[in-house]
Image (tube, rainbow, N blue to C red):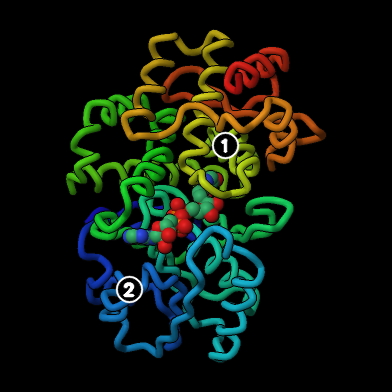
Amino acid sequence: MKEITVQLDERSYPIFIGQGLLQQAGLLKPYISGQKVCIVSNQTVADLYLDRLQSQLTDYQVSIVLIEDGEQYKNMDSFNRVVDHLLEQNVDRKSTVIALGGGVIGDLAGYAAASCLRGINFIQIPTTLLAQVDSSVGGKTGVNHSQGKNLIGAFYQPSCVVADIDSLFSLSQREFSAGMAEVIKYGLISDADFFDWLEANTDSIKSLDKQKLAHIVARSCEIKADVVSQDEKESGLRAILNYGHTFGHAIEAAVGYQGWLHGEAISAGMVMASNLSAAMGALTEQNLDRIKNLFQAFALPIHPPASMSAAQMKALMLHDKKTIDAQVRLILLRAIGDAYVSADYSPQLLDKIITEALS
Ligand code: NAD
Ligand code: GLY
């Protein structure tokens, strides 16, 4: 088992990565303060993994709340269901909420834990690749609003994260690839050697080699933990974790959050951000091709949907949370492995990139 620490002074916490962790006796014990534990999950994940988790919680008073499966249920209705359940269970500040599932369950359960009694103990047990490498780490919690994604939420750190590699074997190939988009992101924004390693190990990652899976989860979590430790509430540096997301979130909104997974949308978005970086002279054509090839090797899209217009993309990009005073701030690359946040790009060049991508 590998352990990585998110360093946040008295709120520091470990991320455990390995095999067989869901049912590892005693692993969670130091992170559960009181007697009451509430597991938040959905039926899909519960059918696969709830028994394993419960086998290490026999000493506690455990209750379970299951939310319908899907991004469309990451909303205030589901949030209210979780909070109603917690209050019916008479939770106190020593009680613990455990999120067992992908990013939808993690974000929702985390926000309920942050809000109920102004904050009760929270543990993340991510079961998708995307959740293990990204959403379970760093404390962004929340739900969607009809006006947009993740518009309601709080920064609320878990007391630990348990990433059991075994859970990745039941994911569909498409969900696995969507998680790989975030993994490739870490190579692009912060670690050129990791990007090279991903290129060299594509086949064994796709065949779910356990050592390689453990490495990609661990390296991704190390990079995310390092960024979050420096800038927990995204006053600057943390925005680089959103590489390609300004374009990607616009794609998700344009298709009504249906038909495109988040990882797929940000894959096309990262290619657009890379195209802009190349047009600004920072990336060579050869490196731009390497980026596109790596996304394609994992069957990820490199173009936005044909149904979208350039005008729609530009309008939706203005809704990005990084936009300040109608100025869209973008994450750009100086090179593979070196990202920065900037509002200092040519709007004409951005227009050209958008128009070309959508022609
Ligand atoms: P998800 O939670 O919807 O999970 C994808 C699908 O896989 C679901 O149908 C789920 O039931 C199923 N599933 C989960 N684990 C499984 C397993 N082990 N085997 C088989 N099926 C399994 O989606 P996701 O991609 O995990 O997360 C996406 C969400 O994460 C979005 O809402 C996004 O906004 C959020 N997110 C949050 C952050 C953050 O920092 N908080 C970062 C990135 C993404
Ligand atoms: N997923 C982006 C962040 O956590 O900041």
Q: Is residue 179 visible?
A: yes
Residue on which disc 1 sits? 248
Task: Label 2: state its secondary structure.
Answer: helix
Give the farthest residue toward the front: 307
- In the structure shown, which secondary structural element does the residue marked by tag 1 occupy? helix
Give the residue at mark 2: 47
Distance from mark 2 CB to nearest ligand 1 atom below 8 Å = no
Give the image location of residue 25, x and y in percent: 23, 76
Q: How many marks?
A: 2
- Residue 156 horizontal/vertical position (percent): 57, 62
Label 2 crowd (10 A; few <14 / some 14-19 / many >=20):
few
Classify 288 as above or below 258. above
Residue at 24% over, 48% down:
214
Q: Amino acid at mark 2?
A: Asp
Query: Who is closer to the viewer here, 127 or 345?
Result: 127
Check disc 1 and give the amino acid type: Gly
Query: Left or right of 58: which side holds 84?
Result: right
Q: Quick one: label 1 or label 2, which is nearer the N terminus? A: 2
Residue nearest the viewer, comparing 61 with 7: 61
Q: Determine the image quadrant of residue 151.
A: bottom right
Asked if residue 112 is positioned above or below residue 139 in the image, the reply reads below
Residue 75 x/y as whole percent = 63, 64
Relative depth, front residue between 77 and 130: 77
Q: Are marks 1 and 2 in contact (CB under 8 Å)?
A: no
Q: Is residue 212 left or right of residue 280?
A: left
10 Å crowding of disc 1: few (<14), some (14-19), many (20+): many
Residue occupying the point 52% across, 38% down:
265
Query: Residue drawn 31% across and 29% down?
Result: 297
